[in-house]
Image: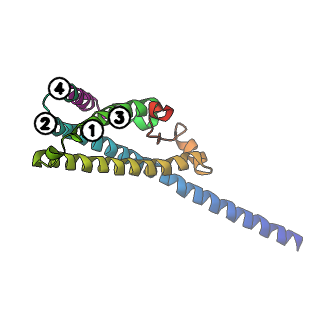
Amino acid sequence: MAASSRSRVFIVIGVVLVLALAFAGARFMNVPQAESRALNAWEEVQRQFLMRAYLTQDVIDAVRTVNPTRTDLIDALEARRQQIIAAPLDDAAPRSQESFHAYLAKQEALSAELVRVLDMLQFFPELRIVPPVSTVLGRLAQSESRIVVARSDYVRAADAYNRMVTNIPTRWFAGLVEPDALPLVTNFDTPEAAGS
C-alpha cells in the first residue's frame, strides 16, 4: 500500500512538472511575439514623431503669417525640424538607455520650440482663428494626440515583453534560447526632465 501511495505521489509530481514546463514553454513561445509587438509599437512612435517634424513646416509658415519678425523662432523651428528629419530611424533605441534618451532629447527640443509658438500665438488671438493658422493648430493638436497614443501603446507592449524576459519561469526559457534578451527601455522622461 505504501509503495502504491508513493508511486501515485511521484506520478502527480511528474504530471505537475510536465504541466508546469509545458505552460512555461508556451509562455516562452510568446516572447518573440511580444518583442515583435513592442518593436512595431516603437516604429509607430518614431513614425508619429517624424510626421510631427514634417508638419512643423506648416507651423513655420503659420508663424511667418502671424509674426514674420520672429525669425529667431522660425530659425529654431527649422533647425529642430531638419535635425529630426535628417536623423535615421533608430530601431535599436529601445535597447539602449543612451540611444533612447538621445532620440527623445531631439523630440523634446522640437516640442519646446512648438510651445514657444503656442505662447506667441496667445498674443494674437484674432489671428489664431484665421483658417490657415487654425488648421495648422488643429493638425498639430491631432499630431500630439497620436504621439501620446503611440507612446502609450509602446510602453504597454514593452512592459509585456519586459515581464516575460525578467520574470520566472519565462526568463529561464528566454535565457536558454536568447541569452542576450534584455528588457526594453520604457521611461520617456529624459534625464534632464527627470532631474528638474
The answer to which image quadrant residue 13 occupies is: bottom right
Amino acid of disc 1: Asp
Q: Which residue is mark 4?
A: 71
Camera-side mark, 4 or 1:
1
Which residue occupies the extreme right position in the image? 2
* Mark sitting earlier along the chain (1/3): 3
Q: Secondary structure at mark 3?
A: helix
Q: Was residue 133 drawn as part of the magenta stretch in this picture?
A: no
Q: Of 142 and 68, which appears nearest the observer? A: 68
Q: Which residue is mark 1?
A: 119
* Mark sitting earlier along the chain (2/3): 2
The tally of labels here is: 4
Query: Gap in Å between the C-alphas at discs 2 and 4?
Result: 11 Å
Residue 40 on image: x %, y %: 36, 47
Query: Gap in Å between the C-alphas at discs 3 and 4?
Result: 21 Å
Q: In this picture, is 28 found above or below 117?
A: below
Secondary structure character of the magenta stretch overall: helix
Range shown magenta: 75-89
Amino acid of disc 4: Thr
Q: Of 175 and 87, which appears nearest the observer? A: 87
Q: Which residue is mark 2?
A: 61
Q: Secondary structure at mark 2?
A: helix
Query: Gap in Å between the C-alphas at discs 4 and 1?
Result: 15 Å
